[in-house]
Amino acid sequence: MFELLKAFDCCHSRGIMHQDVKPHNIMIDHEQRKLRLVDWGLADFYHPRVGYNLWVALCYFKGLELLVNFQEYDYSLDMWGFRCIWFSFTDHISQVHSQCP
């Protein structure tokens, strides 16, 4: 997950919002222990006080801003997707542990 945060730091520091953060857009090279954030088709440069497209992100990973039709969102949209992925990952682990005798 730290690798994913580094990917966000890289794109956000260059003024780019990914806007479609979901597990299917994360590729892992297990041999090289590298992570790649892919599918930049919905990405956009961030400009303060600019309205952006509301039709980004998969419904399960959609930020609260999008759910209330707020168009002036920012990098926090990507971080919301990260938190959703993190929660689904940790929740899955806790479910596996709860099923163990």
Image: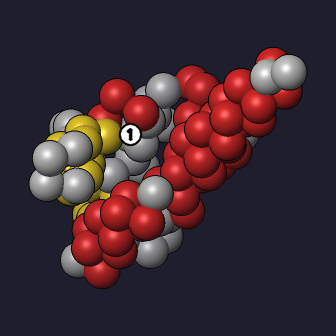
Q: Quadrant of residue 30?
A: top left
Taking depth in this image into account, of 90 and 96 the one nearest to the observer is 96
Q: Position of residue 100 (x, y in %)?
A: 79, 23
Which quadrant, please, contains the C terminus?
Answer: top right
Query: Which residue occupies 43% across, 35% down?
Result: 22
- Total marks drawn? 1
Image coordinates of residue 4 in percent, x first then y, are 38, 59
Classify residue 56 as left or right of residue 44: right
Q: Residue furthest bottom?
A: 13
As drawn, 25 above or below 9: above
Indicate whether 61 appears above or below 37.
above
Query: Can you identify the residue that label 1 sits on?
Result: 20
Residue 39 visible in rendering:
yes
Q: On the rendered structure, is 66 left or right of 4?
A: right
Image location of residue 68, percent across then percent down: 71, 39
Q: Residues within 10 Å of mark 1 (few under 14, many from 20)?
A: many
Give the color scheme: rainbow, by chain, secondary structure or one colour: secondary structure
Residue sitting at 30 percent across and 36 percent down?
25
Which residue is pictured at 43% across the width and 66% down the height?
2
Q: Is residue 15 above or below residue 85?
A: below
Q: Is residue 24 left or right of residue 91?
A: left
Q: In the current view of this chain or complex, which residue is farthest to the front?
A: 101
Determine whether the residue tagged by mark 1 lies in a helix, strand or loop. Answer: loop
Name the residue type under label 1: Asp
Q: Residue at x 35, y 63 (%)?
A: 3
